[in-house]
């Protein structure tokens, strides 16, 4: 079978977001992951191999053969070793890691029961890389490449889809009461900070690719993603990286903590920014998060290389603006990018401080398992570089239904009403742009295999 690897003419793609949403919505290539980096979108599809990690078993599929065995040790090492055994031949891996992945490193496995899925990675047969300057297709047959070009062309300059109204202000999970309970535990000295979240069930099924397209038009994420993989579909507009390790072994993490509304008017946005930069609670929360990230990077970085840059910079992310900082270091020679992921996962801005006690509180007080929420979408290169994007500001869907989820950082100075309002502000980054599925539109629902 002939395979193509070619680049189109410059200027071919005027709307990369419409292009990748069109490829996903066409439903021609089975499971897929769409991942946006600055200036480029990748559509990775039709897995030739998968690595699935559960609480008890590791399952690897390759070339039509499946192997399943019990795993021991740390989940990051199990995934690393599984990928090393596959003949990847220069291919990248893409996938997701659930929040519960953290339980092994933080002595919280008692909270996680089978058959919880911890991670699902895939090695795609087809990769389509799209930028404003053109399109590159790898691994497709000539006929598939022509179909991809036709879909990308057809998606350009088409109208944005219409959203379905979604109410995010009803509190069916007792969020305010849970915030009050966490605040009492903080005052008792059990931990210093915890991120509690609430789930908003949607009363309809979602067209996930269309939601991604509409939502991306109204968001300015650090990274965005769209996926259908491992029985789960999701689209989101992440405000931060959990961790990246590049080919020069530079570790980067960007903690985001401290939130105010954005996008109402220039005067209102400036007032909110001024309030954010002067709020002792938000500054304390952000400083704690940066300190924890610096400590975690220092544990896996060469001496004298950890550094904090862009400290407490305000960045706009859709309907909110955040305090952000960047922490970097050089990975120790005998450590891998998976070691860096384990050291920094889950993001301190989505868990708590100290992290072990914060995660324990999450398992006790958040009620519903988090799954992909506050986990990560990951990309892994053949050279060992890795990028893990924090899963927030997202819509999720499986065969049972669709939902949104958002959280807020609880510290001693928190009030239940303000933290509930913060979850509403964050949900407004995705809720106004959710597109309901219809019989005439691909839903982006997962195909269970």
Image (tube, rainbow, N blue to C red):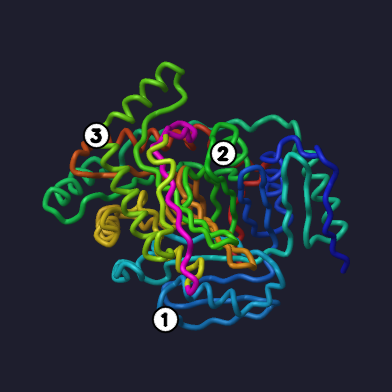
Q: Quadrant of residue 154?
A: top right
Residue 180 appears in the picture as rendered: yes
Overall secondary structure of the magenta section:
strand
Residue in front for this viewpoint, 241 or 277: 277
Range shown magenta: 314-334
Residue in view at x 58 percent, y 40 percent: 211
Label disc, if present, on residue 321 of the rendered structure = none
Residue in front for this viewpoint, 205 or 350: 350
Q: What residue sits right under mark 3 in the picture?
A: 280
Quarter of the image with the C terminus in it: bottom right
Residue in view at x 58 percent, y 45 percent: 208
Instruction: Compute the Cα span from label 3 to label 1.
Output: 44 Å
Q: Position of residue 121 (x, y in %)?
A: 57, 65
Dot 2 alpha-carbon crowd within 10 angstroms: few under 14, some 14 to 19, many 20 or more: many
Q: Residue furthest top?
A: 267
- Tell me which numbered mark, 1 or 2, is placed earlier along the sequence: 1
Q: What residue sits right under mark 1 in the picture?
A: 72
């Amino acid at each position: 079978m002939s395979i193509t690897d070619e680049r189109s003419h410059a200027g071919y793609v005027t709307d990369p977001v419409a292009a990748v949403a069109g490829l996903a919505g066409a439903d021609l290539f089975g499971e897929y992951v769409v991942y946006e980096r600055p200036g480029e979108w990748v559509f990775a599809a039709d897995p030739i191999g998968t690595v699935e990690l559960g609480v008890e078993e590791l399952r690897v599929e390759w070339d039509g053969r499946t192997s399943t065995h019990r795993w021991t040790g740390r989940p990051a090492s199990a995934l690393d070793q599984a990928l090393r055994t596959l003949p990847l031949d220069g291919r990248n891996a893409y996938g997701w890691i659930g929040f519960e992945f953290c339980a092994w490193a933080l002595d919280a496995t008692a909270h996680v029961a089978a058959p919880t899925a911890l991670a699902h990675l895939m090695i795609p047969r087809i990769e389509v890389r799209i930028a404003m300057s053109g399109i590159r297709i790898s691994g497709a047959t000539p006929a598939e490449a022509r179909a991809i070009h036709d879909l990308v062309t057809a998606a350009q300059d088409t109208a944005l889809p219409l959203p379905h109204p979604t109410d995010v202000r009803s509190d069916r999970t007792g969020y305010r009461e849970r915030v009050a309970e966490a605040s009492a535990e903080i005052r008792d000295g059990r931990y210093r900070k915890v991120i509690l979240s609430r789930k908003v069930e949607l009363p309809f099924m979602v067209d996930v690719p269309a939601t991604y397209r509409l939502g991306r038009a109204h968001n300015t994420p650090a990274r965005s993603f769209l996926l259908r993989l491992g029985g789960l579909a999701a689209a989101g507009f992440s405000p931060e990286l959990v961790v990246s390790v590049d080919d020069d072994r530079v570790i980067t993490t960007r903690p985001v903590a401290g939130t105010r509304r954005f996008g109402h008017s220039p005067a209102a946005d400036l007032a909110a920014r001024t309030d954010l930069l002067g709020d002792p609670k938000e500054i304390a929360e952000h400083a704690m998060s940066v300190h924890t990230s610096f400590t975690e990077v220092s544990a896996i970085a060469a001496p004298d290389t950890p550094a904090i840059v862009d400290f407490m910079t305000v960045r706009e992310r859709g309907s909110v603006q955040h305090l952000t900082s960047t922490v970097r270091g050089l990975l120790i020679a005998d450590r891998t990018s998976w070691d860096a992921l384990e050291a920094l996962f889950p993001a301190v801005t989505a868990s708590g401080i100290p992290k072990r006690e914060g995660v324990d509180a999450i398992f006790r007080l958040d009620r519903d398992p988090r799954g992909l929420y506050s986990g990560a979408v990951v990309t892994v290169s053949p050279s060992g570089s890795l990028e893990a994007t924090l899963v927030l500001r997202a819509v999720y869907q499986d065969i049972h239904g669709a939902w949104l989820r958002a959280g807020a950082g609880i510290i001693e100075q928190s009030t239940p009403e303000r933290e509930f309002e913060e979850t509403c502000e964050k949900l407004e980054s995705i809720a106004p742009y959710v597109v309901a599925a219809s019989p005439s539109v691909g839903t982006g629902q997962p195909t269970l295999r």
